[in-house]
Image (tube, helix red, strand yellow):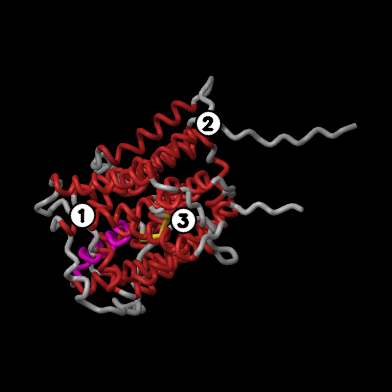
Amino acid sequence: MTHSRISPEDKRYPAGKTFAWGLQHVLTMYGGIIAPPLIIGSAAGLSAAQIGMLVTAALFVSGCATLLQSLGMPGFGSRLPLVQGVSFASVATLTGIASGDGGLPMVFGAVIASALIGLLIAPYFAQIIRFFPPVVTGTVITAIGLSLMPVAARWAMGGNAHAADWGAPGNIGLAALTLAAILLLNKVGNASLKRLSVLLAIVIGTLFAVMSGRADFSGVLQGDYLALPGLFSFGLPTFDLAAILSMLLIVLVLLTETTAGLIAIGEIVETEVDSKRIARGLRADMLTSALAPLFNSFPQSAFAQNIGLVAMTGIRSRFVVAAGGAILIVLGLLPVMGRIVASIPVPVLGGAGVVLFGTVAASGIRTLAKVDYKENMNLVIVATSLAFGMIPLVMPGFYDQFPGWVQTLFHSGISAACLVSVSLNALFNPLKPKVAAARQP
């Protein structure tokens, strides 16, 4: 009797474990998901209450986008354990639009129009999978992990560069404690503890912060307990051609980064990611981005932070990520729950981020170890691509004197490494035409 093999991403676990592991995903990406609405809302001159509305909207929409990406529906969703969230790549452009005369209505109009165009071109964009051999995928995955390390460092230092305790030994010590807890649980714990090591370490770090006076949960009960998402709460969208064109360039970057994320998670899950699967993932990305302004939110893309969690814990089920999406929706509908999560000290998340983001880079290095470097240009491709990927990290102002479209394409280490590695691979390792099989006489 034969049994069909269940793909790793389709494996199911008991509900308790599924939602506990899903909560780990939420905590890993929470800081990243609320940052864009905070920045854009401030640029638009909104009040604290209005910015809070943008934050809860971001949580709600990201939860819905994660469910669509992980569970899928006909034609949409990669059905991979990939968390979706508000893209940071769009922040600079959206901030510029929001601070002008058009405000948020012009922002939302530009997002809707550009995302719909992205939805139309997604199937064609997905064909670039043929330009992603291991030398490219390994480079891109490594760049994803390295590009996230400054995020972990900022979190460990306190998250707010203008705060009095920015970089204080107490903050970094709290991050180190959380990191030590993760390492200890992975060293001495059983399989269950290892898979929950990030969540348990965050709890341990938070409890220590409370005892040492570095965490404050006093504001949790202040404010609304239930808040349903409003529709176009800041007015109907307006459509400005210049704003749409500037966002269209961002959409191309988002398509590139999501493609990189899909390939990276496919490598880690050890499942096939072909052009059809990428097309479904990109369609889900663009559809949720186009619908996000309806609920007062912004473009969605794959969150690289969570790829590291999948790699470290070995929990590759998309249903675990879907549980995280359900939790995000609850956080968006119940602001009191969001305030609880938001009260977790940022340095605690920084300690977890160090090992999670490093795990992504290590996964890329593992892929690069399989590449043949003899009598070819692969070593040059990897070296040059990683160098371009690191430029925005080590010298953020490197492209300040370049045209805006250059800054947009290369401001992210992920997109820079992806574009350079694909281009160099196409130049030095051109695709060989398929040779038809010889007919037998």
> What is the magenta segment's predominant secondary structure?
helix
Q: Tag 2 or tag 3, which sits nearer the N-term?
A: 3
Residue at the image point whose x is 58% and y is 50% from the top: 275
**Where does label 2 land, which residue?**
370
Element at badge 2? loop
Find residue 126 and report its horizontal and vertical position in percent: 54, 51
Residue at the image point whose x is 13% and y is 58% from the top: 213
User: Which class describes the residues within 10 Å of circle 3: few (<14), some (14-19), or many (20+)?
Assistant: many
Q: Nearer the viewer, mark 1 or mark 3?
A: 1
Between residue 212 and residue 70, name the one nearer to us.
212
Residue that extends furthest to the right in the rendered view of this protein: 441
Residue at the image point whose x is 21% and y is 75% from the top: 221
User: Which class describes the residues within 10 Å of circle 1: few (<14), some (14-19), or many (20+)?
Assistant: some
Element at badge 1? helix
277 on left or right of 47: right
Q: Distance of mark 1 from mark 3, alpha carbons?
A: 31 Å
Find residue 245 and report its horizontal and vertical position in percent: 38, 59
Q: Are marks 3 and 2 in contact (CB under 8 Å)?
A: no
Find residue 149 and report its image quarter: top left
Q: Which mark is residue 82?
A: 3
Q: Which residues are magenta?
A: 31-46
Q: Which mark is residue 208?
A: 1
Q: Are marks 2 and 1 in contact (CB under 8 Å)?
A: no
Find residue 56 and report its horizontal and vertical position in percent: 31, 70
Three-letter residue code for mark 2? Lys
